[in-house]
Amino acid sequence: MAIKIVTDSTADLSPELIQRFNIIVVPLSVVFGSRVFADTTDFRGTIFYDKVKEMKVHPKSTQATPGDFTKVFKPILDAGDEVIYVALSSGLSGTINSAANAVEELGAVDRVHIVDSRNLSMGIGLLTCRAAEMVGKGQTADAIVKELERLVPRIRVAFIVHNLDYLYKGGRLNVAQAVMGNLLNVHPMIGVADGKMSVIEKVRGKWEKALLELVAVQLGKPEKVDPHMISITHSAGVPESKFLYDKVAKIVPEANIVTTEAGAVISCHCGPGTIGILYIEKE
């Protein structure tokens, strides 16, 4: 009996990581008016922002449905295998409930193991890759789930937002906050705590200053950073990712640094240029 590792598109895994670790990805969707597109499958990054300009409407994200998960889980179960699904935080989306409903309908509670990442983006991706590595080492599903649940509280995530337009369009700011914030060059730094997003601090000034503050906040205690995998995840922010890569490599020279690009679901909430550093903290 094999173990298949499944996650959803909000994990923001790169195509290279998906292929390397043989990970199956269930896409969420983004909706432009009456048109629905699959996250990461149809577009991501600059292509996504081109679509926003073309459609002239701000997109909304929608969770995956029980049917989406049934399509993925059923063939695996029919082949006699098990599933470990590493899910987007239950505090941010009902997607994990869709997966649970699919499992119940399939009567496969004992063969599909759902792990609430309590996180987003590569906060999910780091756990997913760790699970795949453990599968490669012959670990059992129970052992993998136990290890992932042990790691969940140690995921460290922080993103810095380039401008406030998308936070406003997504309903997280009013127009006055967005206008004043952009005029004053305010860059919110967003983290994840208890499965939900929150503003860690607001950095005022030039964009490079904001990037350096992100590095200071996330890597201020490099001895606590697990170098096994550090992710730099960006939304159409290639120059920023190269800048941060060099900074991270200097601070944690032994680190395995991966660069990934945010999918459309994450991007429609944060906007272009948004970038984060994500890792697992040592015990």
Image (cartoon, rainbow, N blue to C red):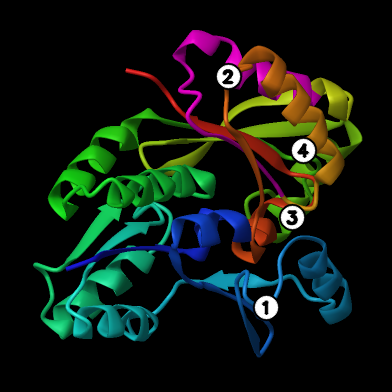
Residue type pointed to by label 3: Tyr
Residue type pointed to by label 1: Asp
- Quadrant in the picture for the C terminus: top left
Rounded to the nearest angstrom, the CA distance separating label 1 from label 2 is 35 Å
- On the image, the x and y values in percent for residue 87 come to 36, 57
Asked whether the residues under the numbered discs 4 and 2 touch, taking CB atoms below 8 Å apart as contact, a structural biologist would say no
Q: Of marks 4 and 1, which one's residue comes earlier in the chain?
A: 1
SS category of the residue bearing label 1: loop
Q: Could you say which is closer to the camera, residue 149 or residue 78?
A: 78
Numbered badge on residue 241: 4
Q: Could you say which is closer to the camera, residue 52 or residue 239?
A: 239
Q: Which residue is mark 1?
A: 42
Rounded to the nearest angstrom, the CA distance separating label 4 from label 2 is 18 Å
Residue type pointed to by label 2: Glu
For disc 2, the neighbor class at 10 Å (few under 14, some 14 to 19, many from 20) is few
Q: Which residue is mark 2?
A: 254
Q: Of marks 3 and 2, which one's residue comes earlier in the chain?
A: 3
**The residue stretch that appears in magenta:** 210-234
Q: Which residue is mark 3?
A: 166
**Left or right for 104, reference 159:** left
SS category of the residue bearing label 2: loop
